[in-house]
Image: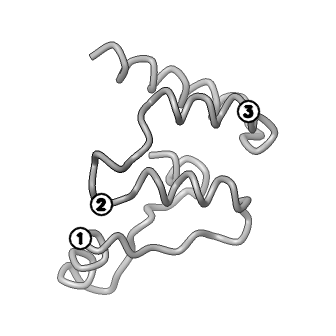
Amino acid sequence: MLFTLLCGAFPFRANSEKELYVKITKGVFSCPEHLSQNVCELIRRILILKPTDRPNAEDVIFFIKMNKKIFLKKSIRLFFLKFLDYKKSI
């Protein structure tokens, strides 16, 4: 969701369903040039294939709070923080 909010597109794109499936299962995507290296690294970590190796909600919230300037649109930052609070309460 973070990738889609920041880029306006899904991280995995392909010409066929089979190719899309392969990219998703292998975690193959490219980070657009307009995103900072820190944001790209966060997205890469979130999309790690093994769920136990991904950052938890607290790690992501900490990153967002420490890098507020990266998330230029306040509405995107607030939406994402509210979403993480909701996920944390489940």
**In which quadrant of the rendered image does the C terminus lie?**
top left
Q: Mark 3 or mark 2: name the one nearer the start of the chain.
A: 2
Q: Residue at x 65, y 34 (%)?
A: 64
**Secondary structure of the residue carrying numbered label 1:** helix
Q: Mark 2 or mark 1: name the one nearer the start of the chain.
A: 1
Where residue 46 appears, x then y in whole percent?
Answer: 44, 50
Please count the marks in the image. 3
Q: Amino acid at mark 3?
A: Met
Is 3 situated left or right of 34 in this image? left
Is 46 situated left or right of 3 in this image? left
Where residue 76 appears, x then y in whole percent?
Answer: 62, 34
**Secondary structure of the residue carrying numbered label 2:** loop
- Residue at mark 3 to residue at mark 2: CA–CA distance: 25 Å
Q: Do residues under tags 2 and 1 come within 8 Å of each other at their CB atoms?
A: yes
Where residue 52 appears, x then y in whole percent?
Answer: 29, 45
Residue at the top extreme? 89
Q: Which residue is disc 2 drawn over? A: 49
Is 70 situated left or right of 12 in this image? right
Camera-side residue of 12 and 45: 45
Q: Do residues under tags 3 and 1 come within 8 Å of each other at their CB atoms?
A: no
Please determine whether, in this image, residue 76 is positioned above or below residue 22.
Answer: above
Q: Residue at x 28, y 48 (%)?
A: 51
Q: Quadrant of residue 33?
A: bottom right
Q: Which residue is disc 1 drawn over? A: 25
Camera-side residue of 23 and 79: 23
Q: Amino acid at mark 1?
A: Thr
Q: Which residue is disc 3 drawn over? A: 66
Q: Pointer 2: residues within 10 angstroms few (<14), some, or many (20+)?
A: some
Q: Residue at x 27, y 77 (%)?
A: 20
Q: Mark 3 or mark 1: name the one nearer the start of the chain.
A: 1
Is 82 situated left or right of 12 in this image? right
